Amino acid sequence: MSDLSTLLSRIDAEFATVEKSIKEFQEEQVQAHQAKEQRIAKFQDVCEQLKKVWGPRLEALAQKFGQKVQVRPAITPLQKAAKFAFKSPLAEIALTFSALPDFEVRNVILDYNLHVLPILMKFEPHRRMEFPLDQVDEAAVGQWLDDRIVEFVQTYLALHQNQFYLKGKTVTDPISGTQFPKYAAADSLQHEGQTYHFIGAETRREFQKQKGLPVT
């Protein structure tokens, strides 16, 4: 039979090995956490650096749509986003541009997400650009944003000319007989309890003459 002290020494060695592994694991996790915190700080610095790239572009997009859009920023330590909600009689349109890191916070991800309801036409709902934290290419980011903004504008305009979205939402100029989307009316007026829409001021004035109304 083996010496009891030898057995106890072997048991202690096993416990010591595990304790060492646990300590090494704890140290590794602490170091990994500290490194990740440093990368998070770097991500925030990168976002600050890119503000001058995406800020003017997103402001320009909002200005072009004026009262037709509401913009809400969504800012957290790990995400910077701008959410655009567009007013349209044809569909619910929401566009989000966001910047966020990957899981390990080693890369920056730029996301473009477009939601349109109802979906009655084909369009690109999602685009993504990714680059390392320490390799920021402002020119490439600017070009990517420009392309996404133009792509959205093309989708928006196509939607407002799409027969499926326009179904039941068109009006007819009583003078020219032209049928067009109600939102595209150049003028309108009330007469005998009915609203008339006109493609231009000329047809509206002709209508007023024919009805014996004061021409304005």
Image: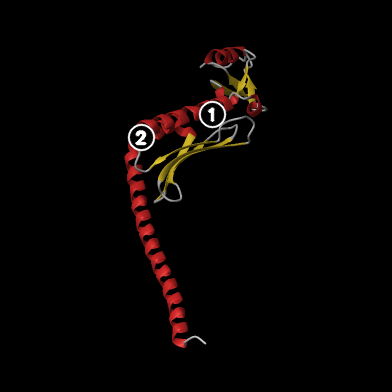
Front residue of 40 and 83 = 40
Mark 2 crowd level (few <14, some 14–19, many ≥20, 10 Å Cα): few
Which mark sits nearer the N-terminus, 2 or 1?
A: 2
Q: Count the marks: how many?
A: 2
Residue occupied by mark 1: 156
Relative image position of residue 17 (x, y in whole percent) = 43, 72
Name the residue located 64 percent from the left edge and 31 percent from the top edge: 120
Q: Which mark is residue 137?
A: 2
Dot 1 falls on a residue whose secondary structure is helix
Front residue of 73 and 128 = 128
**Marks 2 and 1 in Cβ contact (< 8 Å):** no
Based on the displayed image, in which of its 4 quarters is residue 20 positioned?
A: bottom left
Going by the numbered disc 2, the residue's amino acid type is Asp
Name the residue located 46 percent from the left edge and 33 percent from the top edge: 67
Task: Name, please, the residue furthest toward the front.
Answer: 1
Q: Is residue 123 left or right of 34 when viewed as pictured?
A: right
Dot 2 falls on a residue whose secondary structure is loop
Relative image position of residue 129 (x, y in whole percent) = 45, 37
Judge whether 209 appears above or below 33 on screen: above
Observer-side mark, 2 or 1, equals 2
Give the colouring mode of the picture: secondary structure
Whole-Å distance between the Cαs marked 2 and 1?
29 Å
Relative image position of residue 183 (x, y in whole percent) = 56, 26
Going by the numbered disc 1, the residue's amino acid type is Tyr
Q: Which mark is residue 85?
A: none
Judge whether 175 appears above or below 193 on screen: above
Based on the displayed image, in which of its 4 quarters is residue 169 positioned?
A: top right
Relative image position of residue 180 (x, y in whole percent) = 61, 20
Judge whether 54 appears above or below 196 on screen: below
Based on the displayed image, in which of its 4 quarters is residue 25 positioned?
A: bottom left
Mark 1 crowd level (few <14, some 14–19, many ≥20, 10 Å Cα): some
